[in-house]
């Protein structure tokens, strides 16, 4: 039993040291993207509020499961050709690693042609990262992985992105945490990320649409040095520098959807949701696959989105 507990602790700390330095990835990110790309404020004059919660490793009996919460809000002004937004996220991954990110987002939209929109976005704010080993009592105080010093840092944060949208196509790219782009990766620092994504929109008969999507994230200079040796050394490979997601979503009448996604060497996602008037509700279940399936359990994600409608039609 002790060996099992130690193995789980080693795994979670390995992910904290290697992967938790990277930003969280929501499976239902297509519905609100401004936390990873400030250019994703669309050209529809609607006040949109998006919130999502994510709980990982449910059912493993851990004293504290990794938890993520996201709150986005944005609005577009047609006269100014500009979108304004706020984004707040809380990410607690591992046993004692916590990240809070709050920022103001701005996007300027350029109408390239009929139905074609180019958006340039910039967001600025702060990112706070806390590392507190006192929140967990180690069974083995002599464990070399056990930290001893509490650290809490707050730094200026800056993101830049662009996005092109058309009724059949959406392409976006962004760089987040720009002040850290040349910094060494540390537990209490947010490394820069490069995000690129592509989505299609294929109309089908009987009010159906198919939405294929692919997304790539590079976690800049992620430290993959050997922190673990011996029988658990293979766990060090679980921290990934390159993340690739693919998905396919079926949308009916613009209100109901079912989808499936795959994060390479990580998880298979199953998504479902509906839209009713001003409310949108979504649920996602992630099933671990690849090299992590022996060490992780189920992950649940719930999304709520509220829209205050206006008269301007939605492009995407």
Image: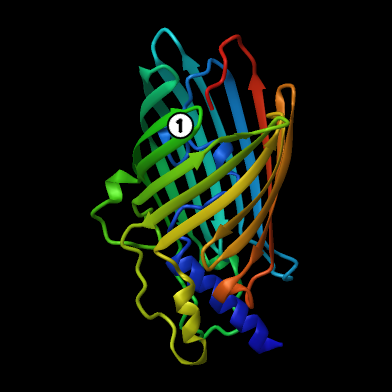
Is the residue marked by circle 1 packed among few (<14), some (14-19), or many (20+) residues within 10 Å?
many
Q: Residue at x 42, y 7 (%)?
A: 79
- Helix, strand or loop at label 1? It is helix
Q: Residue at x 51, y 62 (%)?
A: 132
User: In this view of the protein, which residue sits in the foreground, 161 or 223?
Assistant: 161
The vertical placement of 152 against 101, above or below, is below
Q: Farthest residue toward the bottom?
A: 230
- Is residue 212 depicted above or below 57 in this figure? above
Residue 86: image location, x then y, percent: 49, 29
* Residue 46 appears in view: yes
Q: Nearer the viewer, residue 175 or 6?
A: 175
**For the view shown, which residue lies furthest in the front direction?**
205
Chosen colour scheme:
rainbow
Residue at the disc numbered 1: 40
Rendered image quadrant of residue 112: top left
Horizontal and vertical percent position of residue 8: 61, 77
Residue in the foreground of this view, choosing between 198 and 183 = 198
| Residue at position x 57%, y 49% in the image | 26
| Residue 246 image point, x, y percent | 53, 53
In the rendering, at what x and y percent does residue 227 appear?
A: 40, 80
Residue occupying image coordinates x 69% and y 32%: 205
Query: Along the horizontal axis of the image, is 293 left or right of 161?
Result: right
Q: Is residue 27 visible?
A: no
Quadrant placement of the N terminus: bottom right
Q: Which image quadrant: the C terminus? A: top right
Viewer-side residue, 52 vs 127: 52
């Amino acid at each position: 039993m002790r060996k099992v507990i130690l193995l789980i602790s080693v795994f979670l700390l390995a992910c904290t040291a290697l992967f938790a330095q990277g930003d969280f990835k929501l499976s239902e990110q297509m519905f609100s993207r401004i936390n990873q790309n400030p250019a994703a404020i669309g050209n529809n004059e609607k006040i949109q509020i998006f919130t999502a919660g994510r709980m990982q490793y449910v059912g493993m009996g851990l004293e504290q499961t990794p938890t993520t919460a996201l709150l986005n809000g944005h609005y577009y002004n047609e006269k100014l050709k500009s979108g304004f937004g706020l984004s707040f996220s809380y990410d607690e991954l591992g046993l004692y690693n916590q990240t809070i990110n709050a920022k103001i987002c701005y996007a300027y939209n350029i109408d390239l042609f009929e139905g074609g929109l180019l958006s340039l976005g910039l967001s600025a704010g702060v990112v706070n990262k806390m590392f507190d080993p006192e929140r967990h009592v180690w069974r083995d105080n002599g464990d070399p992985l056990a930290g001893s010093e509490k650290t809490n840092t707050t730094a200026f944060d800056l993101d830049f992105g662009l996005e092109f949208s058309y009724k059949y196509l959406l392409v976006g790219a962004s760089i987040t945490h720009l002040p850290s782009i040349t910094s060494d990766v540390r537990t209490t620092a947010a490394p820069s990320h490069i995000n690129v994504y592509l989505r299609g929109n294929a109309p089908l008969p009987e009010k159906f649409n198919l939405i294929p999507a692919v997304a790539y994230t590079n976690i800049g200079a992620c430290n993959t040095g050997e922190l673990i040796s011996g029988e658990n050394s293979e766990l060090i490979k679980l921290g990934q520098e390159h993340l690739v997601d693919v998905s396919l979503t079926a949308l009916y009448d613009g209100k109901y959807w079912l989808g499936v996604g795959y994060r390479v060497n990580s998880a298979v996602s199953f998504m479902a949701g509906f839209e009713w008037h001003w409310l949108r509700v979504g649920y996602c279940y992630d099933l671990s696959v690849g090299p992590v399936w022996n060490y992780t359990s189920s992950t649940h994600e719930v999304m709520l989105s509220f829209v205050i409608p206006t008269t301007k039609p939605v492009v995407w």
